[in-house]
Image (cartoon, coloured by chain):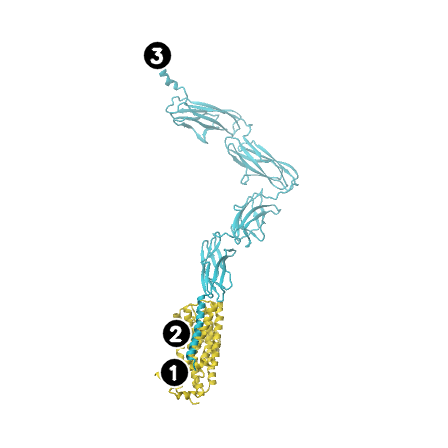
Amino acid sequence: MENNIKNVIIITQKEFADHIWSPRFLGFAITFTLIVFVFGYQRGAEVDYLEHLLGTDGMLRGFLGIAKIVGTFAPLIGIVLGFDTIVREVKSSSLNVLLTHPMFRDNIITGKIIGSAICLFLILLISITISTGTMLTISGVSADGEDILRIGIFIIITFFYALIFLGIGVITSILVKNSSNSLVYNIAIWLFFTILFSQIILSCVYTLTGGMEGSIEVAVGSGVLNLSPGHHYAQVAMGANNVGWGGGLGGDPRIAGIFDTHFTITQWLTEFWMNLVVLIVTPIILLIAAFIAFLRKDITR
Amino acid sequence: MIKETLAVLMIILLSAPLTSADFAHIAVTTDIVGKVVRPGDTAEFTIYLEKGYNTTDDVSVTLFIDKKPDDDWMAGFYEDNDQVSRITFPAGESGKKQVTLRVRIPENASDGTYIIKTGFQPYGESVTNYEYIYRDFVVNVDRNAALNLDMYADIPGRATHPGTPVTVGLRIENDYDSRTVVKLDVISKPSEWGVDLLSDDGFRITKICVPANDEKEIDVVVCPPINVSKGDYTITIGAAPETGDQYITEDLSISINPDIESPQGLSTYMEIHAPITGLEIRPETPAEFIVTLRSRYDQRISLNLKALEMPENWNVEFLSVEGEDVRITTLEMPPGGEQQLEVRVRPTTNASDGIYPVIVGALLDDGRSISQKLEVTINEGIENSQILSIYPSYSEVTLNPGSSTEVRVNLRNNWDEPLSNVQLEVQDVSGIRTEIRSFGTIEELEPGESRTIPVEITARADAGSGVKEIFMRARSSDIQSEEKSIRVDVKKSSGSGFIGIGLVVLAILVLAVMIRKFGRR
């Protein structure tokens, strides 16, 4: 058992190190941080607009803006971290070499998933923390302990949301034969669930009902939106229906997400606990599925 | 010898009580006992009653008319205008009392001499002599006797323009000892001339009551025709006792001269009056005066109401007292009519402090006018008398960028009438956003009523540090309150700055540690 843990830690550490020194990943992480910072600062300055429309106060106004950006692009980090996790090792034959050591498949997949997850969490933590700190320093906007707590919860929610796409990426990398295909499949999944899902559902409802009126209500009421991770993330983070196109329409939530300071965190938790459960359970199921798939995988080239 | 001495003493002692009866207890004295009067007149005679030597006992006296010409003659005794029949002199006092014998001569009394015999009878405990005291008074009735009335004009001769009325004051003096009703008449005047006799309060009169030994003044308004030719004209005014036919007269000489300048004033026949001629206001508040117009014309006249003089860009309105919204430009005055008007003077809002005269007038079509000067004092420093006042709950607040606070502004109607459509106006300031958290305007604010309006003040997240001032005022149609301000001190939160730097440093440290710890490949 001790050896297994030690093996997992070693694999985790090496996977983490591979990611943070990967130019491809570094470039993407820096870009993401900049996007978060720029949008956060810009939205933070748009006091009138945000206050009138969203009713939040203080520095959290900025985070309502970046929640949409993060909800759109954070899945890409998960995909980037996961799409070639296994297929890369298979293609380079390093997996076979690795398995010649006293190292088991479960050690390898666990370590890789944990390493990628830690890296994913670190990127989210660093990018959002740096953005927050810079906003506070430059604007002088007041922030209290609860604001910081809400930002922390936001980071964790975003982490689980991105973890879903990491799990999808890992599964894809186990199932497909090369990295390119894995990337294409992952991008397609990301586009479908994150960007286009709401619009497709709305278009379907529109086509079926023959009118725009009430389409959003029908789409929300049908529960189809629950199939999209973006829907659950948008609910808990912004109180919106989805993060992509058409996501901002309709859905008049009582609480406008974690940054709605008109309500306490407890009230927010009571309102959105179902969405939170989905966000936490889904990546776990996906990672278990990846675990099983990898154990059953034929690792010959 | 002894017998003779005793006899003398007895005589002396017995003679004392007998001699006391020889002195009267009451003395009746008069000064004038005869008067010349006219039938219908009242003759008065003064009688003095004096207590005699005995001052230790009270003494009364009965007064009576013993004899008068016939029953139509009225006679009586009066003290302080009260008819009396008995008078008492209290014990321990001596003195003199005056009573008046008043004799009313009948209208039908023929000329001649008449005697009124009066009697006085003293009585009392110590009075032993009940003899009557009689006094005779003589009244000579003479229909040709001169009246005890006098009449004279203050200015018996005046010059005027054809068609322009003139007023002459006339005094009627009553020298009778009793009040006299005097009938007045215009004895003679040129044809087509108007002559009116007016009392001091402007009413036409035909009779006037003049107290005894007093005088009364009347106005004689003479209105010559427009087409009268140049020259001197005489108007004779007569006055006579109400019951008599003998007049005393006064001639008034009116010189008509078309060459003299026609007086512009209407003051002879018109009067304009304002009980309050000065008001102190703020520039945004109108001054409201009540002006009364009174006509003495015999005919209906039309008057144009105008502001004859006022500061530039000011506005003067003539409003009906009954309905404030009705503005009046022309007024039809009935004969002897009176009309109250509200004159609303509205200064320009930028008028500086000072005293401003406003002359309002009523004009006839021929250009003659009467005017009233009103004074409006502009004082921006008036606070307590504000019709509409506002009181913010804070005069200064401190905000961090992005933060907000709520200030409650109290609006109060200090007027005695309700204010409608009251709204709060807040001036925009760069970097500060204000939001009035109430819907629309206050439809009506009753006298003395106040309302509180919450105003949210938000410092924009990009607002620079420093003090900014938000100005606000309440407005109700043409009335507005004084301007109040709230100073907003925008301070960047140094604590947030430190937290931000701390977060950045923490993130970099975490990244460095993670890379150093787990970054080895």
Q: Colour of chain B?
A: cyan
Quadrant assignment for the N terminus of chain A: bottom left
Real-space CA distance between mark 1 and mark 3, rounded to the nearest whole angstrom: 180 Å
| Local SS, label 1 | helix
Q: Chain of mark 2?
A: A
Name the kind of residue labelled 1 in the image. Answer: Val
Looking at the image, residue B314 sits to the left or right of residue A68; the answer is: right
Q: Position of residue A22 (x, y in %)?
A: 46, 81
Q: Amino acid at mark 2?
A: Trp
Residue nearest the observer in this picture, B464 or B83: B464
Residues at discs 1 and 3 both on one chain:
no
Q: Tell which subunit mark 1 falls on.
A: A
Give x and y (percent) for residue B452: 45, 58
User: Which residue is labeled 1 in the image?
Assistant: A8
Pointer 1 or 2: first along the chain:
1
Pair 1/2: label in front: 1
Q: Which mark is residue B5?
A: 3
Badge nearest the viewer, 1 or 3: 1
- How many marks do you count on the picture? 3
What residue is disc 2 on? A273
